[in-house]
Image (cartoon, grey):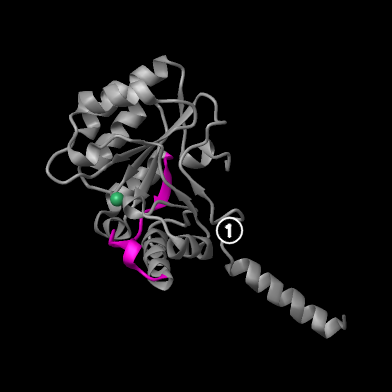
């Protein structure tokens, strides 16, 4: 290759690598990691919320455990202090779209835009670019997977749905979860549910019990072995 051509090739390569997503394994879909012995991941969707997110963080801090928050971009803009509180706690941030709309009915470019708007809302507050994406309702499909890959995300679903979104009483959430939990489970919870919250009460039961059983609470990326 001639020197000029080589230079152009190298410069173009550097530019490409600078704008390319940082997640080299993007495009995978995860719901749990059974090989993560003794580890589990709590995840909270639909925040940040000015009341419930700080209350959840207070409980996590009390037990000195980590979790992952899949945030809605619009809520990051509306409640920046609650978002900063998550960052301050050391918990992980994931992307949960900007509007929480029906992405099953969106085109690839519309989904990319949802992801990008949330990235921009986050970037206004902190130099952070999430690499994990949870589609609202756990929707999957080729457009969603292509958009995730294009924006540099792995898709993270869950292996245990606590049904806190359906106002399931705290003790029932806890009983079902404690009867089903296993190595590498990803637990779906919410830091915002309209008309009341049973999540906080459930956390008060399940966290001390699972710690007593020897489980370690880690972020999703730690659970998947990316950190
Ligand atoms: Zn959601």
On the question of residue 126 being in view, the answer is yes
Residue 14, quarter of the rendered image: bottom right
Look at the picture and state if 67 lies above or below 176. below
Residue 206, horizontal then vertical, whole percent: 32, 23
In magenta stretch: residue 102: yes
- Considering the whole magenta stretch, tell me its main secondary structure: loop
Element under label 1? loop
Asked whether, in this view, residue 21 is left or right of residue 4, the answer is: left
Disc 1: which residue: 22
Mark 1 nearby-residue class (10 Å; few <14, some 14–19, many ≥20): some
- In which quadrant will I find the C terminus? top right
Look at 41% across and 56% down and name the residue there: 140
Asked whether, in this view, residue 24 is left or right of residue 184, the answer is: right
Residue 210, horizontal then vertical, whole percent: 39, 20
Single out the residue that lies furthest toward the left: 195
In magenta stretch: residue 157: no
Residue 135, horizontal then vertical, whole percent: 37, 54
Look at 45% across and 25% down and name the residue there: 182
Which is nearer the eye, 156 or 221? 156
Residue 224, quarter of the rendered image: top right
Report the span colored magenta: 90-107
Look at 58% across and 58% down and name the residue there: 22
Look at 35% across and 30% down and name the residue there: 61
Asked whether, in this view, residue 14 is left or right of residue 94, the answer is: right
For ligand 1, tell me if the residue under mark 1 lies within 8 Å.
no
């Amino acid at each position: 290759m001639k020197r000029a051509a080589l230079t152009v090739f190298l410069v173009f390569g550097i530019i490409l690598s600078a704008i390319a997503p940082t997640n080299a394994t993007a495009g995978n879909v995860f719901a749990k990691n059974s090989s993560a012995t003794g580890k589990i991941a709590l995840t909270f969707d639909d925040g940040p919320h000015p009341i419930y997110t700080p209350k959840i963080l207070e409980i996590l801090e009390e037990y000195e455990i980590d979790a992952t928050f899949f945030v809605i971009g619009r809520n990051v803009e509306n409640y920046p202090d609650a978002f900063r509180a998550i960052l301050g706690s050391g918990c992980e941030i994931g992307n949960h779209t900007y509007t929480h709309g029906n992405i099953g009915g969106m085109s690839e470019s519309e989904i990319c835009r949802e992801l990008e708007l949330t990235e921009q809302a986050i970037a206004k507050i902190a130099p952070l670019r999430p690499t994990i994406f949870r589609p609202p309702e756990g929707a999957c499909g080729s457009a969603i997977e292509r958009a995730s890959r294009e924006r540099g995300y792995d898709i993270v679903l869950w292996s245990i749905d606590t049904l806190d979104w359906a106002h399931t009483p705290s003790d029932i959430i806890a009983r079902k979860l404690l009867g089903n939990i296993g190595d590498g489970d990803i637990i779906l919870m919410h830091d915002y549910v309209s008309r009341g919250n049973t999540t906080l009460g459930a956390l008060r039961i399940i966290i001390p019990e699972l710690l007593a059983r020897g489980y370690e609470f880690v972020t999703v990326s730690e659970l998947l072995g990316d950190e």
